[in-house]
Image (cartoon, rainbow, N blue to C red):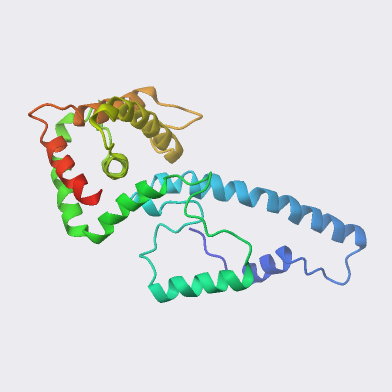
Amino acid sequence: MSRIFPGQARYLLRLLSLKFPDYLSPEQKQAWLRFIMRWQQFTGPIMAKGFEDTVLYVYTRLISLNEVGGDPQTTGISVVEFHRCNKARQERWPHTINATSTHDTKRSEDVRARINVLSEIPAAWAQRVERWHRWNRLKKPVVNGRPVPNGNMELLIYQTLIGTWPLRRKEMPTLIKRFQDYLVKAAREAKIHTSWLYPKIDYENALKKFLTSILVPINGNRFLQDFMEFQRVTA
């Protein structure tokens, strides 16, 4: 990443805060203002597509933190800090909503609540992931010489299963179909192996095949049995 030097930082501050030099004419000031207003129109979409709809599908350490307006690097806050933030919000913005779910939320509250449990049992979770990775290695289709999914996407799959596992067995066929569609969306948003503009159908089909293979309810599927035992803890 390129560094921003002090002189550049001062220039950007002056530019963006409209600190006009005295010698500028009214027409030049108006042109400056038009430029800044136009620039502001691009900052929102850049943040949305670059961070919220790309990075949050690539960085999958704990996906319940990957929310619009959130920070996936956080390790949580204390109860005291939580109340301090609420008090500040009440004083400064008393008529806003401190919502836990909106039209933009990537995962519902109950899904995030299940996934959040993993942060309380990190050793048990790490042990399970290593075991599942080993068991499911041979179930990965190979596309262009590489097994699909890679470790990053595999981690997203396991966490999403933890969060969305149905309460009733009869819902499984629906879950698999919806999950396959979600995997394609997540992979295209991440833009690593496929994308909306240049979809790689072979890769996307491999993702779907992997998901189906690890959820086949047969006696030899050690993963499914072990996963169902573990998800009862997080649920």
Coordinates of residue 147 in the picture (x, y in percent): 24, 32
Answer above or below: position of 17 versus 151: below
Q: Where is residue 181 in the image (x, y as percent from the top left)?
A: 39, 29
**Residue 105: percent from the left, percent from the top?**
48, 47
Q: With respect to residue 165, does 8 lie above or below?
A: below
Q: Quadrant of residue 37?
A: bottom right
Visible residue check, residue 49: yes
- Front-most of 150 and 25? 150
In the figure, 187 relative to 159: above or below? Answer: above
> Is 54 on the left-hand or right-hand side of 133?
right
Judge from the rendering whether residue 138 lies leftward or rightward of residue 63; answer left or right. left
How many marks the image carries: the answer is 0
Q: Which residue is drawn at 41% across and 44% down?
A: 57
The residue shown at (52%, 45%) is 104
Q: Which of the 4 image quarters holds residue 219? A: top left
Residue 137 image position (x, y, % from top left): 16, 35
Left or right, 164 with respect to 196, comes to left
Q: Can residue 145 be seen in this view?
A: no
Q: Residue placed farthest to the right in the image?
A: 26
Residue 28 vs residue 141, the one in the foreground: 141
Q: Residue at x 70, y 52 (%)?
A: 39
Q: In this view, does 169 lie to the left or right of 160?
A: left
